Image: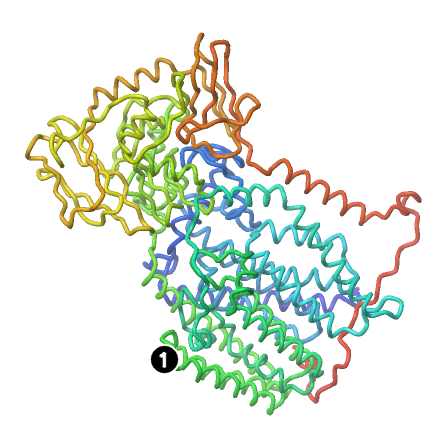
Amino acid sequence: MSTPHSSPRRHSLFGSALAALITTVAVCAGDALARVFPYGPRHRGVNDLGNQFVPFHAHLWDLLHGRAEGGLLLNWQSGYGTSFLPDFGTYLTSPFAVLVGAFPREDIDLAVYVITVLKTAAAAAAMVWLLRTQRSGPWWAAGLLGASYALCGWSVIEAAYNPMWLDGLIAFPLLCLTGEWALRGRRPGAAAPVVALCWTANFYTAYMATLGAALVLVVRLAQERDVVAGGRPLLGRVRVLGRAATATVLGVALTAPVLAPLFLSSKQAYPGWSREFAPVATGDLLARLLPATYSFSSPALFVGTGTLLLVAALPFHRAVPARARLWWTGLVVAVLLSLQWAPTHLAWHAFATPNGSPYRQTFVLAGIVVIAAWAGLAAGLPGVRALAGGAGVLCLAALGAAGSSTATGWGYALFGGGLAVAGCAWWALRGRRLVLPAAGLLVAVLVGQAAATIAYGHLGKLGGLDDYPPWGPAHAARAEALAGAGGWPAYRTDAGRPALTGNDPLLLGGEGGAYYSSHTPDVFTRTMVALGAGWTSRGRNVQSLDNPVTDAVFAVGARLRPDGTIGRATAAPLVTVRPPGPPLAYGPSPFANQELLLGARVYEAPLAPGLCRAGTEAFLWAPEYNGAVRLADGPAFRLNARPPRNRAALQPMGVAHGPASRLVFDGPVPARWELACLDRARLDTAVAALRASAPTAPRVDASGVRVTLRPGTSGTVVLSAPAIAGWTCDGRPAGAHLGLVAVPVGPGTRSVACTFRPPGLVPGTAVAVIAALVLLVRLVPLGRLRRGGGGAPRSRPRPSVPSGTRSPRARASDLRV
């Protein structure tokens, strides 16, 4: 037997399912139209998606299947050992991320794509549930609006290749839902966990979603007249805000074990690119309302013409109370303008201008537009005058975009055609016999416009951004070679150069030096640069350094060569001992710095500029050179430098054969360069010395390293891992030796144990425990505890209902099918 609430709940489920279905069809159709993976030969993995996010999901797959080197706290595979919890919290804490484990590892690109589609569909479903919670209305219309939100331009163009941002798309309606619970005095125990889930999934976009949800709650409160406390409406509104704020604070506090290490890691990361915010031109802003537009530096405002028409008609919709029209229209306009004003731009982005796309908060505006559209539709269908007024507003906006290079002919055609069809469909819905065909037309308009926007966005991204191929034979061959050469922890295996991605150790295997993350430690980047490494992404994507000296000091005993073979060498062990002496510091020459870290002279100066002694190996350092270079009798090598974005790595040039091997630049000689000549015999002697004095019985696990020292050892024990914050040795904070983890020891020291724990983990856990206790106390009142749970149940406030709604000739409730 059904309860009185079963039908509304069932209709909400129907609407959510419809929204998810429309969203999935549109996304897949747009990708297929563009012929991108998995529907065609074009690469989907553009920019950070292929270079960063897919490899991190591959590492999560390895963790789930017990194949990763390291654990949740420490990643031994990247950057010669780095903290993993901040990366986990930034890229992989979404509940959807674990689904990668259900796919074969060679289908990692497909797994990330499926997760992306599922997240987008989930955002559509969540928005439907919110809309139906706020106001009653036709379930199919809520489904249409929910899909319009999930298919907004920001979602399908920007978040589609930043999949963790899609968690923010889901978070906005969920956080607005907690505001509804606070408004109605319901589900006090669920609100904080929902907030925690959203902030854990992706704190960055959850922050923006929280701001947007707060604005929505304020507008909802401004329209409610039934929120009272003993006849004092102001006190009632304050109590609602207090309930919402308490749930938010407790929810965020519950995420502290992840957020605290993440924030501290961000402060210790190598500085990224920052720029002053400059608002986009008004024409370009308006152009992004059209479908089939693309720009990396303007807000993707598209949300479907059918939805835009409802919002534009809202000020003219007389069935909606004037108070509601004023508040919702004002909120939409205010948030739109906030995108263009520097102080509010900074507030949306946690007071730090983001690297790259400057309009990452656009999804909040899309959500508010959809909520405002539902507020109008739930009051009744707009009449001819309201639709005409809304169409006029949108036509003026389209005219304002006419001078923008962002606007396209296809965009105008889709916009104009969609506006005409949507206008007719909304008008036709006033007749009950035309509900199904009119609704079908609205769905077709949304799917067609969204699919075209997706396809056009793919063309724009592939035309202006780097792209990376999905897993294929080249990946499989490299992964197989690395697995066959592995010897960890006796020695590291490096994925080598040229790399397929910035995170090849995570994607392919091994324990190399390459690492690309928002959390790339400052100490790691500076250490590797001092040794001659190259970078991209302005220092956050550190490349593997192909050099025998650095391989020796970082315990790299096997390296993948460009031809697919494995090069092997005897390297120093993971932990070595350096003799006592004064503190050392790097200088300007990477070759001298390598010798300083190795503890021996192994390079010779050239016999003449650009000329090494026969039998030695030539290495060139020209960090700002962009062009080809070669020994006169050898092959050419390409150095890629575009300061400050890209820095060229130290390049092995081959064995010199005397005067015939003089260095030749194919372009203008750079202002700064250095050639050094490696004597392999000296290097072998230095490595043998390090191995002879090295500690014995090393034990390496997911939390650190423990070694036994040889009798009489004194000096400095050095772990060939970057000296990032969080390392402790024998219970004390670890020191640093030229950027590596180090601890001084005397003759009486028998063993050394170094453990890594991300800074902020302990205090973050303490905050979460306190928040959980506070939540428990709030859920189980003290009086009930004293009575053993026998107290009378508390009455719940009646759900508040928007007041002043007038009944139009065709009510929204008449459109249920």
Determine if residue 816 is in view.
Answer: no
Find residue 814 and report its image quarter.
Answer: bottom right
Q: Which residue is more in the foreground, 540 or 368? A: 540
Where 753 sits versus 539, above or below? Answer: above
| Quarter placement of the C terminus | bottom right
Most extreme residue toward the left, as rendered? Answer: 660
Q: Position of residue 550 (x, y in %)?
A: 31, 30
Most extreme residue toward the top, as rendered? Answer: 711
Identify the element where label 1 is drawn. Answer: helix
The residue at which mark 1 appears reads as 409
Left or right placement of residue 683 versus residue 327 in this view: left
| Quarter placement of the N terminus | bottom right
Number of numbered discs: 1
What residue sits 40% from the left and 64% below the top? 296
Q: Position of residue 619 (x, y in %)?
A: 21, 34
Classify 10 Å Cα crowding around label 1: few (below 14), some (14-19), many (20 and above). few
Query: Disc 1 marks which amino acid?
Result: Gly
Where 272 sits versus 304, above or below? Answer: above
Q: Position of residue 146 (x, y in %)?
A: 59, 69
What residue sits 8% from the left and 30% below the top? 658
Most extreme residue toward the front, as rendered? Answer: 582
Left or right placement of residue 808 versus residue 311 in this view: right
What residue sits 19% from the left and 26% below the top? 604
Q: Which residue is more in the foreground, 619 or 557? A: 619
Find residue 761 and report its image quarter.
Answer: top right
Determine if residue 26 is in view.
Answer: yes
Q: Position of residue 474 (x, y in %)?
A: 30, 44
Where 173 sits versus 619, above or below? Answer: below
Q: How is the image coloured?
A: rainbow
What residue sits 30% from the left and 39% below the top? 477
